[in-house]
Image (cartoon, rainbow, N blue to C red):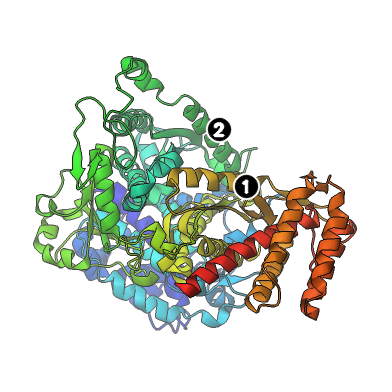
Amino acid sequence: MEKIRERIYLASLLHDIGVFYQKADNGTVLNSYYLKGKCKEESSFCPFSAGEYKHKHTLWTAQFIEDNSIVLKHLLQEDLDNSLLDKDGLLFLAAGHHLAPDRLSTLGNIIKEADFLSSGIDFNLGEAEFDTERASFKKNCMLSVLETISIHNQNAGKKREWKTFPAAKLSLSKELFPQADSSAHQDYAQLWKEFEQEFKCIQADTYLAFAETLLALLFKYTGYIPADAIDFSDVSLYDHLKTTAALAVCMYDYRQSGGDCSQSPFLLVGADFSGIQSYIYQIVSKYAGKNLKGRSFYLHILSDAVVRYLLKELRLFQANVVYNSGGGFYLIAPNTPFHKEQLKKCVEVIENHLFKVHGTALYVAVDAVELSKDALLHRNGEDLRKVWADLFIKRDRKKMAKFATQIETDYAWFFNPFMQGGETERDSITGEEFAPDESVVKKGDLVLKSVTASQIDLGKELRATDLIVIKEGEPLAYWKDKVHVTPADLGFTYYFLKESDLKRMEDELRDAADKITILTLNGEKGNCDFMHAVEGACNINGIEFYGGNEFGFNHSVTFEDMCDNASFSRMGVLRMDVDNLGNIFQEGLPAERATLARFAALSRSFDFFFSGYLNTIWRETDPERSFIVYSGGDDVFIVGSWDVTIRLAEKIREDFRAYTCNNPSFTLSAGIAIIQPKFPIMKGADESGEEEQRAKSHSICLSDGVRLEKNSISFMDTPLNWDYEYRPVKALKDTLCTLLKEGKVPKSFLSKIMCHYANATIKEHRITHLKTYWMLTYDLNRMKERSCPEVINLINNCIKEVCDKTKKTLNGCAIETGYHALELWNFAARWAELEYRSNIVNANS
């Protein structure tokens, strides 16, 4: 039988599709609207136990393949009418995975065991028996894996009332957040109908194109359907199908190589890029807007190209990618001599190609560790968390010795001077000196390196890009006039097109077979539609999330424009990420629940929020005065008007809390540099990084003795805990702004607060210049003589809180903080002055 690996892959992707199909069926096996003929014969695929047949969803799996026999016959070139007799046929491989091992072929047992390993169930101990005809099975909702995470003994995994996802197709909408009661939104019948309609639109007639498009379709429709009604239903059907397919292919390759599958048949491959931050920010301010977006997106597709190169050379599929976002990726590969040797060669090629194009600016550390069945099943003292931690350590060690191979082979490049320095010609965007004999590209008054020029073109094109078309092998001659990039010359060319471009090239797309992948970028306003039916074309279709690709942003807008182009304007540079991410992956799941499918679900959850949903937050906040430079993995980098970046940070944090079901294990820290629009963006990024580090280093001790770390926002050199400090300080700022706007308090009140703060010489949150107490009291009391009752109350609060060390209030509101009250009054006054000045200028402009 030809293409056995592809058959195993496709069968694994479909093995539990009956879970979805059965949920859409209101009937039982006997009175089902969908089951017909031989697919109603329970003995064919359902194990018999305690006097009844179990796992009846397998009948719906078989029926689905029967329903689509016309589509599949051409693809499989097999007689589906006799597929019940062929244990290595697609139908039996997909539907028979719950049968006893002696009723299955060798290939069938591979899929059966991969199903167990994905779920973390010991193959040798059997499986839980469950009747999927029970009403509870058809109504159960999927929990969020994020709500189950627990670090620092938060005990999040021991809750009794859980939020659940509505059963819905993928979209970048808050409606897909976990809800207190989503059972009213479980319309599986309609969801299944839409899935089937799109399934029939898959035009591919090769295994690769068909299966990879199916994987994307499963992502869209089964990402919020629980895979398991027996155990804790916090893993989606998509993550289970995907990891089962990856493990099955690896086990098949391992067996074919002669390996003993009782050992360690898998490799966990991990990679992390170094130099991303400095590479993005290395831009001179004058031309920053022309290059920031393109430079950021280039890194995104560079990582994707590395992953695609590894999949190609290791003969793997997209399901083998556990995670790819934020400058890092993880793959599951077979632990065979071929794959280990091939991986070693691939790493050498990747390192050399990156070095040739980018020198020492970028480096990717790729390494692998063996992964055993024991680790996947948490037995014999092994667990997946330890394997993940070992990979982190091994990968980080490699980063400590980066460019070792290149130094050995090209010693002179590293240690012999060849640059001129001084006033030699440099790249207008990055300031980098041109190497001898390096080609120069001129764009108007700009003198650029070729890679910089392509990134400028990419940044401009992204605003109008609907689709990314990826061509494996030689670039397409008929699209040479389109903006395209071949990252690090790894054999994959990325084209940035409109929908109309695709329609004009239907004939060419048919000829390209499965060497072309068509990715829809985010989808129009987050609707995630991606099927592009080109009749007769054997192309792979999918969807790609990317933070910041929005058609609303005008790339001709300057930073000054975003900051209102007024006589008083300030730009905000926001950097933000998840706290304790390493601990979340290594400790967040108890060992017995640390399955591969859950790790995949955890990674995908972050990617959905930061690469996808963040676009929704940006669009709903103030897209005309900000833009997302980068958002992916767990990182955010946004530039905009200073006030908009603060509001964006608030909204991101607010929605992230809702998305993680207010799990205290998940917190965000943010840093915002407030700078002039013409300030060098590289320095602005450095300053926002320093602010972010202040936020991550910040801690407060509550009155009950509990110390809280991180979970803070910092700007104007002052970190504030989101929950206990930021809210009361913001409330005070709002009060000051309101009183200023209404003319009830003079602006000199702010000046007096800031002046007394400057003279107080505060050290370790204590006033060392003791005259401050009576000087502030005298000064502010004089203002009371000509003030209204509201302002008098404000002044009294300020005097009491500054002079009375026992006060734990800010303008009368309770606060938990380690700051002296004068520090917070000063910060609120500075913030209010900045906002008031901005409002005055905007009103007059």
Q: Percent position (x, y) of residue 679?
A: 45, 48
Residue type indicated by callout 2:
Ile
Kindly check if marks 1 and 2 are in contact, taking CB atoms under 8 A apart as contact.
no
**Front-most of residues 316 and 438:** 438
Q: Which residue is mark 2?
A: 393
Task: Give SS at disc 1.
Answer: loop
Q: Please, is residue 834 above or below residue 153 in the view?
A: below
User: Which residue is painted at 48% across and 53% down in the image?
Assistant: 676
Residue 505 lies left or right of residue 601; in this view the side is left
Disc 2: CA contacts within 10 A as few (<14), some (14-19) or many (>=20)? few
Disc 1: CA contacts within 10 A as few (<14), some (14-19) or many (>=20)? some
**Front-most of residues 41 and 391:** 391
**Front-most of residues 452 and 400:** 452
Q: Evaluate whether residue 406 shows in this view.
A: yes
Q: Select label 1 or label 2 by which is in front.
A: 1
Task: Give SS at disc 2.
Answer: helix
The numbered mark at residue 580 is: 1
Pointer 1 or 2: first along the chain? 2
Q: Percent position (x, y) of residue 632?
A: 45, 53
Q: Evaluate whether residue 96 shows in this view.
A: no
User: Which residue is painted at 90% across and 58% down in the image?
Assistant: 806
Q: CA distance from mark 1 to mark 2?
A: 16 Å
Residue type indicated by callout 1:
Asn
Q: Please, is residue 136 above or below residue 536 in the view?
A: below
Q: Percent position (x, y) of residue 132?
A: 53, 72
